[in-house]
Amino acid sequence: MVEFKCNLKKYRQMANLTQEELAKIVNVRRETIQRLESGKYNPSIKLAVDVSKALNVSIEDIFIFD
């Protein structure tokens, strides 16, 4: 079974963005960002790329699949 870890909250806070602000940038609902941060939602490739670009952090640093 693949374990999913997410560092999104850390990098979002480093960028001084709220969940709502990041959600608007990547065109999703705030709840989607909240679920990503809590590890309850695996991002699509497009969403992972969009979040990575918005935060200027590599996908591998934000989303970790072990």
Image (spheres, rainbow, N blue to C red):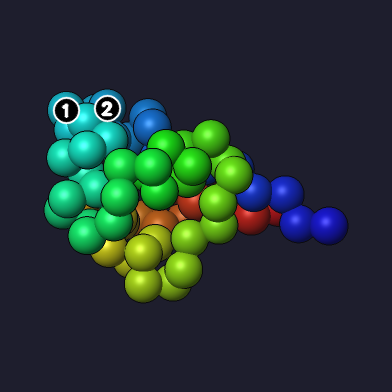
Horizontal and vertical percent position of residue 59: 41, 58
CB under 8 Å between discs 2 and 1: yes
Residue 53 in view: no
- Front residue (pair 7, 44): 44
**Which residue corresponds to mark 1?**
16
Q: Secondary structure at mark 1?
A: loop
Q: Position of residue 39 (x, y in %)?
A: 58, 41
Screen quadrant of the N terminus = bottom right
Q: For the residue carrying disc 2, how many other residues have a C-alpha within 10 Å: few (<14), some (14-19), or many (20+)?
A: few
| Tag 1: amino acid | Asn
Whether residue 57 sits left or right of residue 63 in the image: it is left
Q: Which mark is residue 13?
A: 2
| Nearer to the camera, 65 or 35 | 35
Q: Is residue 44 visible?
A: yes
The CA span between labels 2 and 1 is: 5 Å
Residue 41 bears which disc, if any? none
Residue 9 placement (x, y as % from top left): 38, 32
Mark 1 neighbour density, 10 Å: few (under 14) some (14–19) many (20 or more): few
Q: Is residue 7 above or below residue 61?
A: above
Compared across the picture, whether 32 is left or right of 51 comes to right
Please state which amino acid type lies under the numbered disc 2.
Gln
- Residue in the image at 48% along x and 60% along y: 43
Give the secondary structure at mark 2.
helix
Horizontal side of residue 35 vs 24, given as left or right: right
Return the residue found at the far bottom.
46
